[in-house]
Amino acid sequence: MFRLAPLLMLVGWITISTVIVGLAIALSFSGIL
């Protein structure tokens, strides 16, 4: 169980980063279009 915590935190950070990058790309595309 203790080994799953860092993995879950890593997955969470990757998910949050992906969402932020996706929003930034969407905003830049909508700004260009």
Image (cartoon, rainbow, N blue to C red):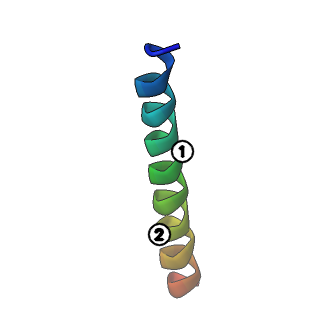
Pointer 2 residue? 24
Mark 2, residues whose alpha carbon is within 10 Å: few (<14), some, or many (≥20)? Answer: few
Between residue 27 and residue 8, name the one nearer to us.
Answer: 8
Query: Where in the figure is residue 31, as x and y percent of width and height?
Result: 51, 86
Query: Could you tell me residue 17's position as x and y percent?
Result: 44, 51
Give percent across and percent down for residue 11.
50, 33
- Distance, label 2 to label 1, CA atoms, is 14 Å
Tell me the SS state at disc 2: helix
**Numbered tag placed on residue 25 in the rendering:** none
The three-letter code of the residue at mark 1 reads Thr
Residue at position x 53%, y 13% in the image: 1
Q: Nearer the viewer, residue 32 or 1?
A: 1
Whether pointer 2 and pointer 1 mark residues with C-beta atoms closer than 8 Å, the reply is no
> Which residue is painted at 51% across and 41% down in the image?
12
Mark 1 highlights which residue?
15
Vertical relation: 2 (above or below) 27? above
- Compared to residue 7, the image places residue 3 above or below, namely above
Q: Give the number of the mark in front: 2 or 1.
A: 1
Q: Across the whole image, how many numbered discs are drawn on residues?
A: 2
Q: Is residue 15 above or below residue 29?
A: above
Under circle 1, the secondary element is helix
Q: Residue at (46%, 59%) from the top-left corner?
A: 21
Quadrant in the picture for the C terminus: bottom right
Q: Amino acid at mark 2?
A: Ala
Point out the residue furthest to the front here. 2
Between residues 20 and 33, which one lies in front from this camera angle? Answer: 20
Of callouts 2 and 1, the N-terminal one: 1
Q: Residue at x 48, y 61 (%)?
A: 20
How crowded pointer 1 is (Cα within 10 Å; few <14, some 14-19, many 20+) is rated as: few
Q: Position of residue 24 (x, y in %)?
A: 47, 69
